[in-house]
Amino acid sequence: MKKANWKYWLISLFSIVLFLFAWWLITDGAGIFPPQALPGPKKVVTSFINKLSRRSPDGGTMLEHIVASLQLALYGFLLGAIIGIPVGICMAWYRPVDLFVTPLFNFIRPIPPIAWIPLMLIFFGIGTTAKAAVIFVSTVTQCILNSYQGIKQTRDVHKWVATTFGASNTQILFKVAIPSALPMIFTGLSLSMNLAWMTLVAAEMLAADKGLGYMIQYARMMARVDLVIVGMAMITIIGAILNFLLSSIEHAVVKGRHME
């Protein structure tokens, strides 16, 4: 198993090195693309280092932009999870709740998250509340959907065994249905995290004065392709870190449930 893991990491590392080499080759190496159109890796790394301490040209350092984006993303994500997961569980377990909520949910679900941005700006203005509301709408639907499907996939034989031993409907929900639905619930959380991050960047491009999306948009207007790439790279890195943390929590929680 350890040998297989080493092979996986070596293949992943090789793909990254190959990508960086190809990037260097078509820019600084062979000069296929001019620096104004596509700066090389050295220029991008230099711009990243400079941005750690410099506010120009967008008025904020890299850390300030990252903190602003993370705060909004986590606000919307946590609110969507806190509301979406219980709603999805109740919809799947209690028929009246399902009949009441499903029509509204089916109406909202097909709407792309970005389509909510103009409406939220009208309701809440240009500020934190509007962007957090957009992120909430984008995350809550995935939390509801995956929680609903996870509970619905609870096996009837497990319910029957619990009923045979005298468990009540509520006990079956918390002792059988929810533990078995945890993998689906965490799948919904992972999808919601990715949606929150993507929606936030889109919202910041339209209305913000801080954040990675704002930095990318400002750099585009200033023709600073190097800063655009820096912003995109930071979005990728932070997204990967958040997914890793969420996967670690899932592994710990689901494993603990199974051991019980």
Image: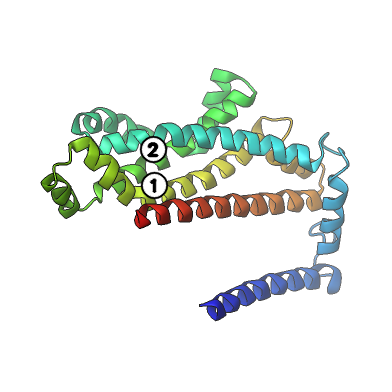
Pointers 2 and 1 in contact (CB under 8 A)?
A: yes
The residue located at (67%, 72%) in the rendering is 13
The residue positioned 40% from the left and 35% from the top of the image is 84
Q: Which mark is residue 171?
A: none
Relative to the observer, which residue lies in front, 244 or 59? 244
Q: Is residue 257 visible?
A: yes
Label 2 or label 1, whichever comes before in sequence order: 2
Q: Quadrant of residue 35?
A: bottom right
Residue 207 at x, y = what percent? 66, 30
| Residue type for callout 1 | Ile
Image location (x, y in percent) of residue 248: 53, 54
**Residue 185 position (above or below residue 123):** below
- Residue 185's disc is 1
Residue 256's place in the image compared with 55, above or below, is below
Residue that protrudes farthest toward the left in the picture: 164
Q: Is residue 82 above or below residue 32?
A: above
Q: Could you tell me residue 194's position as x and y percent?
A: 53, 47
Expressed as whole percent of the image width and height from the top left, the position of residue 48 reads 82, 51
Mark 2 — residue?
Answer: 85
Determine the residue positioned at 67% across, 54% down.
Answer: 237
Most foreground residue, 110 or 241: 241
Q: Looking at the image, how many numbered discs can be counted on the residues?
A: 2
Q: Residues within 10 Å of mark 1 (few under 14, many from 20)?
A: many
Secondary structure at badge 2 equals helix
Q: Is residue 192 left or right of residue 234?
A: left
Q: Quadrant of residue 170?
A: top left
Residue 85 horizontal side relative to residue 61, left or right: left
Q: Nearer the viewer, residue 142 or 22?
A: 142
Give the amino acid at mark 2. Ile
Q: Find numbered disc 1 in the image and state the secondary structure of the residue it sits on.
A: helix
Could you tell me which residue is drawn at 13 percent across and 49 percent down?
Answer: 160
